[in-house]
Each structure stands twice: as structure tokens, then as C-alpha cells.
Image (tube, rainbow, N blue to C red):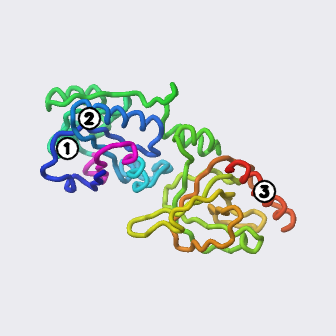
Amino acid sequence: MRSWHGLDDVPGDWGRSVITIGVFDGVHTGHQQMVARAVAMAGRLGLPSVVVTFDPHPEEVVRPGTHPPRLTTARHRTELLGALGVDAVCVLPFTLEFSRMSPDEFVQTVLVDRLHAAGVVVGENFRFGHKAAGDVETLRTLGEKYDFEAEGVPLVADGETISSTMIRERLAAGDVETVTAALGRPHRVEGVVVRGYQRGRQLGFPTANVESPEFTAIPPDGVYAGWLQGIAVGNLPAAYGGERWPAAISVGTNPTFEGVARTVEAYALDRDDLELYGAHVAVEFGRRLRDNQRFDSIEALIEQMHADVDEARRFTS
């Protein structure tokens, strides 16, 4: 799969193609169905398929301060889209100037002049151009003008309408199992392992303290069962070859120790030999086990941690 950052990366000899457009945050099951339609159209026409997506999130540019929590990093989103069988992913830098393009300018500049659209597939609620003036009907009309077919499809999986907004709402409620079903995989938080207070190690449960990028969608405070995995970023290989370990995960401020900073910490079950400082990792959330609570003694906390680990082991085994 080819990956382009901006229109200037598109090869000058790129021919006609079928394009699907969207933010694709989460690359959820509805997105997956839409991309599959584009890939099928490309196969029917004997052309390559291209996903056009945006970074940063348009809301961050158009309405600063309202950036929705991000379900996937730009890098992971590109990986997920590539795994769906598309031939290329083009990530367009979303700027204020870009947001001021009229629908016609967007279509001519992006879809026609650079990607030579023969077909375009979008979600049925797709909006584009300055002040979201364009919709699917606008796209069909412009398709007649510029000689491409346009199709708007519902973002539906198993008869249910799926949206990134719905997934964020369920994640904010701690309903990670519904999120898993909507994404087709567990939600994950990526980041770099940094040094914390090392209390987990002192208590017998050494944790990876994960510092995630700004705007990351993180479930509410609590204890979860899931997985911890090293991931490759840029030229950095994945720690431990990308091995994926069952994990007990804590999100919160460590109320027993009167903590203030909110952290995401993952304990790889039965592993006290991992050296992950500075490594890029992914923490995947499979099931919410309980709310955070303040314990009256360290002994009570350790007893509960053993119970959490046992429950996490049952879930992930």
C-alpha cells in the first residue's frame, strides 16, 4: 500500500482511481463497510482505490478547543485503512486555508486534478467544503460535471448505524465492550512508557506508565482487563518484537496514595522482567472490572490487585 502525506506526494503519473473520503477516526465497522464498497467499485472498474483522510481533525481547526477525543492516531489509522485492501492512503493536512475551499474547489483540486477520480464513495451524511456547504447530492452533481460517479452509503454494520461520536460516548461511559463491537477490535491507547512513582513494582505488580498524545480518547477512571503490546513507530522497532501480553490496566489518579495526575498504567500479567521505558506501546481495553477506590491500607490494596489480576486473567485467557 502507498502512503502519501499531502497532494504533493501523489505521483505525477497517477491515473484514474476510486476514492473514499472521511476523517475515519477509529476506522470502525461502518467505515470498514464504506471502504469495502470503494474497493469493490475499484475492482469493477479495474482501477486502484484511494482513501483520502485528514490530519489534524477538522474540528480542531474550524472550532479550536472543541477537538473530539481521538480514537486512533494518524499512523494507526493509516495502518488500519491499509489493512482493508486499499491501494493508497492520502493524508491531507487540514488547515484553515484548506477549510475555506468551496465544494467545487475541493473536488477539482483534490479529486480531479490530483487523484483523477473515476468514482467516489462517501458516507451518506458526508459534508465538505467551506462551512460544510457540500453534501452527497452536491458531490453527485459535481461528478456529472467532472466525469466521475458518486455514491453515498450508510455507515452500518450488522444492521446498526455506527459513528465515531457514538463510540466516543460509549467509551466515556466505560462501556468498552460495546466499543470493541463497534470498532471490530478493542479500543487502544498508544504512547511512550515513562517513569512514574514505581509504586506498582513495590507492590509486586510492575506497570508500564503510558504517556499518550494530546486529545487521546481514554476511558474513565477505573480498572480494566485488556492487553499491552509494543508497537513500531517510524524507524523504531516494536519492543519485544511486538509481543502482546494480557494485562490488568488502571486509569486514574491512584486515590490510595492521594495522587493528582491522571495516568494509564498496564501490568502485563505474570511478567516482572519487562524493560519498557522509552518504548512505544499500545494498551487495549477489553472489559471494565471496577471503579477506582481508596483503600484504608496497603494490604487491602494488594489483596484487591490480586483479585483484579485474577479477573483480568480469566477474561484474556
Q: Tell me the magenta residue range.
A: 81-99
Which residue does the image show at 60% across and 45% down from the upper left?
172
Which residue does the image show at 40% across and 54% down from the upper left?
74
Q: Is residue 16 above or below residue 255?
A: above
Q: Which of marks 3 and 1 is nearer the N terminus?
A: 1
Residue 42: which disc? 2
Query: 87 left or right of 301?
Result: left
Question: Please, what is the three-letter code of the amino acid marked with disc 1?
Answer: Leu
Question: Please, what is the three-letter code of the amino acid marked with disc 3?
Answer: Gln
Residue matched to label 1? 115
Question: Please, what is the three-letter code of the amino acid marked with disc 2?
Answer: Ala
**In the foreground, 20 or 137:** 20
- Relative image position of residue 190 (x, y in whole percent): 52, 59
Q: Marks 2/3: CA distance?
A: 53 Å
- Relative image position of residue 43 (x, y in whole percent): 27, 34
Which residue does the image show at 22% across and 41% down from the upper left?
106
- Disc 1 is placed on an element classified as loop
- Disc 2 is placed on an element classified as helix
Nearest to viewer (mark 3 / mark 1): 1
Q: Is residue 84 magenta?
A: yes
Q: Marks 3/1: CA distance?
A: 54 Å
Residue matched to label 3? 293
Residue 256: which disc? none
Which residue does the image show at 43% across and 70% down from the upper left?
236
Q: Which of marks 1 and 2 is nearer the N terminus?
A: 2
- Relative image position of residue 120 (x, y in whole percent): 26, 34
